[in-house]
Amino acid sequence: MGRIRGICIAAAISITLMMPGLFMVQGVRAETVSWTVALYVNADNDLEANWDDDSLPMLENIPANADLNIVAAVDRYSEDGCDLVEITYGSSQVVTSYSEKNFGDGATLQWFITQMDTMYPSDNLAVVIWDHGGGWKWVSWDQGDDDDIYMPELYSAIANAGVYIDVLVFDACNMAMMEVIYEVSLTGKVDKFVASQESVPLDGFPYDLMLTPLAQDTSRTPAQVAVDMVNGFETYYDPLSFTEVALSAVDVATISNSFSTIDTWTDEMYDHVGDYKKQMAAALRASHCAWSTSEYVDMADLGDNLLAQSKITDPGFRTATTNMVSLVDDAVIAEWGAEKCLDARGFTIWFGVRWGFNWYADQYETDCSFATDTSWFAFLDAYD
C-alpha cells in the first residue's frame, strides 16, 4: 500500500497581484500567469501530519514569483470541511472554505481541476495528486469516506474537467505504471507524467528542490519542469538511506502516438505464451520489480530480459519486444532510482500471477482500459 494524504483544504502557493483586469472567484483574485501548480491533497487519513510537517514547509520554501501560482486542495482527517490555501514564500493563508468533500471520489478531483483552472488561470498547469497510491488499483484513499479513486474515475475526472494538464504528478506510491499512463493518455488532456514505480517515503516529494527552478524561470517548458522534478527528487533522496525509491518523467504523447507498438508486443506475448512460458518466467524473475518481490515489473527491463532468453527465437516476437523497449526508453524523459532500483527504467506493468491474478483479475479486467484494449489480460489469463 502506498502513501495517503488528505484534508479538505485547497492550498495554493500563489503570488496574486491586486491590479485592474483581475477577476474575483469566491473571494480569490486571479490573473493569467505562466504556471499554476495545483495540489490535490488528500490528507483525510494517516498522512495528515506529513502534509503539515513535510510537504507544506517544503512548498513554503519555494522562492516567490508573481508569474507562478502554487495551489493545493487539502482534505484533513482531523477537521470537517475544505479550505483554499494560498502559500507564498515563508507563509500560507486560508482564503476560502468549502463543505466536507470525499477526496476519494473522482467527481471531487474533477471539481478540483476545474476550480483551479478557473480561479488560477495560467498558460501551463501542473496537477499533483498527493496521497497513498496502489498503481492501477487505486489512488487517493479518503479514510473518512472509506473511498478511493479507481482508473475509470481518474479517466472521467480528467476527461470531463476538459482542462489541459501540462504535467500530471503523483506524489503517491506505485503510480508509474503502463496501465495508469495509458488511462490518462486516453483523455487527450495530459502532456507529461511524473510518478514513482516504487513507494514514496513519508517525507513525500521535496517540492522546494523540485520547483525552485520553475520559480526562478517561469518560461520553463512542461518537459523541463518534469525533468526538474526528477532531479530534485534525486538531490533529496540520493544522500539518504532509502534504497528502494525511484521517480520518472514520461512523455505521454510518445506512448499515445506509437501505442500500436505496445499493442503488437502484447499480441506476441499472448500468441507465444504456450511456446515460451518457461523463458517468460525466467525473464520475470530476472527483472526489476517494485518492492523487489511484487508483481509490478519494470516494463523495459522485462523486455530486455525476454530478449536475453536464447530459446526465444521467433523473429516476430523478438522484433516486437525490441520495438517495445525502444518506445519505453524514448518515452521516459528522466528517471532516477536508488541502490535497489538501478535497473528501473521508468514505469512498470502488472504481471499478476497465481493468487495475485486470481484475487485481482476481475478488477483488472473491469477497471483497466489497457487490460482489455490490448491482449495483456488474455496473456495473463493464459500464463496463469
Image (tube, helix red, strand yellow):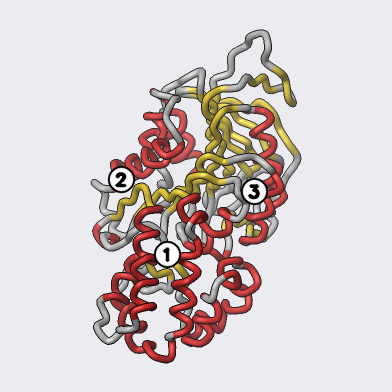
Q: Nearer the viewer, mark 3 or mark 2?
A: 3
* Disc 2 packing (10 Å; few <14; some 14–19; many ≥20): many
| Percent coordinates x, y for residue 143 in the rendering | 63, 57
* Disc 1 packing (10 Å; few <14; some 14–19; many ≥20): many
Question: Residue at image x 57%, y 44%?
Answer: 41
| Percent coordinates x, y for residue 76 in the rendering | 62, 44
User: Is residue 302 rendered to the left or right of residue 383?
Assistant: left
Question: Residue at image x 43%, y 50%?
Answer: 250
Question: Residue at image x 24%, y 46%?
Answer: 239
Q: Is residue 315 above or below residue 300?
A: below
Q: Amino acid at mark 2?
A: Glu
Distance from Cα at disc 1 to Cα at disc 3: 22 Å
Q: Is residue 278 above or below residue 244?
A: below
Residue sitting nearer the eye, 59 or 335: 335
Q: Amino acid at mark 1?
A: Thr
Residue placed furthest toward the bottom: 274
Dot label at residue 234: 2
Residue with the mark numbered 1 = 348
Q: Earlier in the sequence, mark 1 or mark 3?
A: 3
Q: Amino acid at mark 3?
A: Ile
Residue with the mark numbered 3 = 158
